[in-house]
Amino acid sequence: MSPEDPQETQPLLRPPEARTPRGRRVFLASFAAALGPLSFGFALGYSSPAIPSLRRTAPPALRLGDNAASWFGAVVTLGAAAGGILGGWLLDRAGRKLSLLLCTVPFVTGFAVITAARDVWMLLGGRLLTGLACGVASLVAPVYISEIAYPAVRGLLGSCVQLMVVTGILLAYVAGWVLEWRWLAVLGCVPPTLMLLLMCYMPETPRFLLTQHQYQEAMAALRFLWGSEEGWEEPPVGAEHQGFQLALLRRPGIYKPLIIGISLMVFQQLSGVNAIMFYANSIFEEAKFKV
């Protein structure tokens, strides 16, 4: 038998600490960051109620044909793909907080362009901008929340990211019953604007500050969020400089969860869930289904 890798046999869950941080501001900071995923969900769900309105009641220059309607829903994914790459670049260079602040700009600008649209190209441009913001927010918000949360609530707060995404989709669907496409876009500006205002008063994550050798600022952020420094585990010296090595993929503890995680994401996308979200209203109308 080959000797066991000590990293493979360490328990994933640690025994509870003697004292748990009780800082409540961590919940406010997590809520502020989670407004990004809420805006993400709203942008995903926006096209479903907006497309029927644009096809029936919009001025001739804005009226969507079948091809334009398809692009109006799908173009957000192109922006999100670019936003994911941009978010990864911003994450380590601008920091978690500034990345979240910056992603509010294309969110608000995109919905504002849709609101002021005079032709179909402005509608598509607005959707592309909101997609760019979606890509950044979907990457940065989970990192920010996981790095500011203390262990006792990290799982709870981490699950709020997906909860806020589906809440945003639901909000777009429900609001679409009573608001036409232009006012629905105005409503879409509200969550990112609130996020911008709240995040201005929230700190950068202690972990990122430590990677920038800002020890005092990291401890100040920790006290602001947790109320104390108890329970904090400082990253090992030089941990931020440790690169990825292909040899790590030979470890079952690495490649098994990696394969499972990638497979789950791939099959979720191949299920066509995005098409349902983008065109749910149109699908039910074509099926002659009336609520």
Image: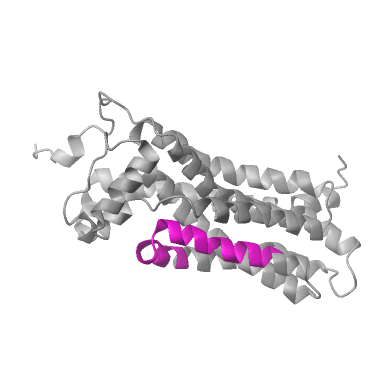
Q: Quadrant of the C terminus?
A: top right
| Residue 50 or residue 228, whichever sits in front | 228
The secondary structure making up most of the magenta span is: helix
Q: Is residue 71 visible?
A: no
| Residue 289 or residue 230, whichever sits in front | 230
Spot occupied by residue 252 in the image (x, y as percentages of width and height): 25, 44
| Residue drawn where x is 74% and y is 70% of the image | 123
Image position of 280 (left or right of 108): right
Q: Is residue 143 visible?
A: yes
State whether residue 62 is above or below residue 251: below
Image position of 189 (left or right of 21): right
Spot occupied by residue 228 in the image (x, y as percentages of width and height): 31, 36
| Residue drawn where x is 69% and y is 63% of the image | 111
Q: Which residues are magenta?
A: 86-111
Spot occupied by residue 139 in the image (x, y as percentages of width and height): 46, 56
Image position of 243 (left or right of 106): left
Q: Quadrant of the N terminus?
A: top left
Spot occupied by residue 57 in the image (x, y as percentages of width and height): 91, 62
Please tell me whether residue 27 belongs to the stretch shown in magenta: no
State whether residue 265 is above or below residue 75: above
Please tell me whether residue 105 belongs to the stretch shown in magenta: yes
